[in-house]
Image: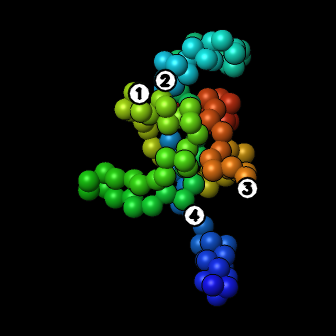
């Protein structure tokens, strides 16, 4: 109803969503596609560069056991594909220091996830 929508809007406006970074190596198929499209012309060893993406609004974070719950549609398909194939990722909590980078990597209103970029393309230093 209208009261629930208003409360939800106010809560989301007042309480920031938790935000984290996920980094993965691209899947073999993604590397081949990148080679064909020459997406990373300016990066040395361009096809082996990890992809990084912003995870917005994750929930269920725990350290024992290490757990982070997120929807599979909350990360770009390239990152999800790399995660499924390689089964390895790095997760980092986004901090105030990366505020501008996070803003540039955030999902637009019509998107479920933001873009996947190399660390350099995202303006981040690994």
The answer to whether the residues at label 4 and label 2 have Cβ atoms under 8 Å apart is no
- Determine the secondary structure under disc 4: loop
The answer to whether the residues at label 1 and label 2 have Cβ atoms under 8 Å apart is yes
In the rendered structure, the answer to whether residue 27 lies left or right of residue 86 reads: right
> What residue sits right under mark 4 in the picture?
17
Q: Nearer the viewer, mark 4 or mark 3?
A: 3
Q: Nearer the viewer, mark 1 or mark 4?
A: 1
Q: Earlier in the sequence, mark 3 or mark 2?
A: 2
Where residue 5 sits in the image (x, y, percent)? 65, 79
Residue drawn 55% across the image and 17% down it: 31
Observer-nearest of 93 and 37: 37
Q: CA distance from mark 4 to mark 2?
A: 29 Å
- Is residue 7 in sight in this rendering? no
Observer-nearest of 38 and 90: 38
- 10 Å neighbourhood of mark 4: few (<14), some, or many (≥20)? some
- Determine the secondary structure under disc 2: loop
Q: CA distance from mark 3 to mark 1?
A: 29 Å
Q: Earlier in the sequence, mark 4 or mark 2?
A: 4
Q: Is residue 106 above or below residue 124?
A: below
Instruction: Kindly identify which numbered label has been placed on residue 27.
Output: 2
- Determine the secondary structure under disc 3: loop
Seen as rendered, the residue at the extreme front is 1
Q: Is residue 78 above or below residue 102?
A: above
Q: Earlier in the sequence, mark 3 or mark 1?
A: 1
> What residue sits right under mark 1 in the picture?
85
> What residue sits right under mark 3 in the picture?
109
């Amino acid at each position: 109803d209208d009261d629930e929508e208003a409360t939800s809007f106010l809560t989301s406006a007042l309480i920031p969503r938790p935000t984290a970074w996920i980094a993965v190596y691209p899947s073999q198929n993604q590397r081949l596609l990148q080679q064909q499209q020459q997406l990373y012309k300016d990066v040395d060893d361009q096809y082996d560069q990890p992809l990084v993406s912003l995870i917005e609004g994750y929930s269920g974070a725990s350290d024992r056991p290490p757990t982070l719950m997120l929807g599979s549609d909350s990360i770009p398909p390239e990152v999800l594909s790399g995660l499924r194939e390689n089964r390895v990722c790095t997760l980092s909590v986004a901090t105030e220091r990366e505020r501008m980078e996070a803003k540039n990597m955030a999902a637009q209103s019509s998107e479920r996830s933001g873009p996947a970029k190399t660390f350099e393309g995202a303006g981040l230093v690994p």
